[in-house]
Image: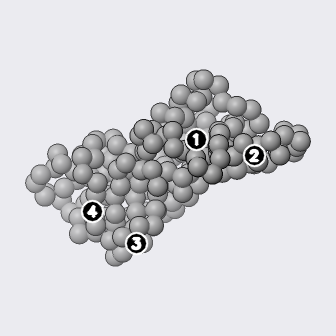
Amino acid sequence: MRPLTEEETRVMFEKIAKYIGENLQLLVDRPDGTYCFRLHNDRVYYVSEKILKLAANISGDKLVSLGTCFGKFTKTHKFRLHITALDYLAPYAKYKVWIKPGAEQSFLYGNHVLKSGLGRITENTSQYQGVVVYSMADIPLCHSSTQRAPSNNVRAKGKKLLNPTVWFGGRPQLATTRSSGDQVLAFSW
């Protein structure tokens, strides 16, 4: 387990900043202690410095994981956020989407959300902006990206609002699971 290099830190922080913006500093300097990011087997872990010092006695080949897995670096050195980071991104998210209870399960099974299934959305959400998707009971469901800004789509032509397309291997395909959290929401009003 080692600290991230400058390039790895930059790539990871750019990805996280897409969802929480300038609140990134609040993720590292928390009131309950100082937290840091560590790399182990191409996976980035979010761990408190207190636990990190205790884990220094364990050899790297015997260590499976430490802290919360935030994501991983691909072979092409891109950073992919995991769904396990959702609990830490959700409180600081700048842009949010709420889905009504009737459309929530359908969305989680990989179907589209109709326009009637959208509860609300944060104002000024731009195109390709990272959002956190919530249920109407304020339970975070996943993190995603918008394909179009809702403000650009004034005319209501279609009923399809959110497209739960998951990116696997660089090409979009419909999926019935939300374990990866790498989702793209397409707004088509």
Give the mark nearest the N terminus, 2 or 3: 2
Q: CA distance from mark 2 to mark 3?
A: 34 Å
Residue type for callout 1: Val
Q: CA distance from mark 1 to mark 2?
A: 13 Å
> Label 2: which residue?
50
Disc ID at residue 137: 3
Kindly identify which residue carries mark 1: 28
Q: Is residue 121 left or right of residue 25?
A: left
| Callout 3: SS | loop
Badge nearest the viewer, 4 or 2: 2
Whether 104 is drawn above or below 168: the answer is below
Q: Is residue 17 left or right of residue 81?
A: left
**Disc 2, SS:** helix
Q: Residue at x 41, y 67 (%)?
A: 138
The residue identified by callout 4 is: 120
Residue 5 seen in this snapshot: yes
Type of residue at label 3?
Ala
Q: Residue at x 47, y 46 (%)?
A: 167
Q: Nearer the viewer, mark 4 or mark 1?
A: 1
Label 4 packing within 10 angstroms: few (<14), some (14-19), many (20+): few
Q: In this view of the protein, which residue sits in the foreground, 73 or 55?
A: 55
Can residue 18 be seen by looking at this rendering? no
Badge 4 marks a residue whose secondary structure is strand
Residue at x-position 53% and y-position 28%: 10
Q: Which mark is residue 140?
A: none
Return the disc, 4 or 1, that comes first in the chain's sequence: 1
- In the image, is 164 to the left or to the right of 150? right
Which of 12/116 is in front?
12
Front position among marks 3 and 1? 1
Left or right of 107, for residue 88: right
- Looking at marks 1 and 2 on the same chain, the residue that comes earlier in the sequence is marked by 1
Q: Quadrant of the N terminus?
A: top right
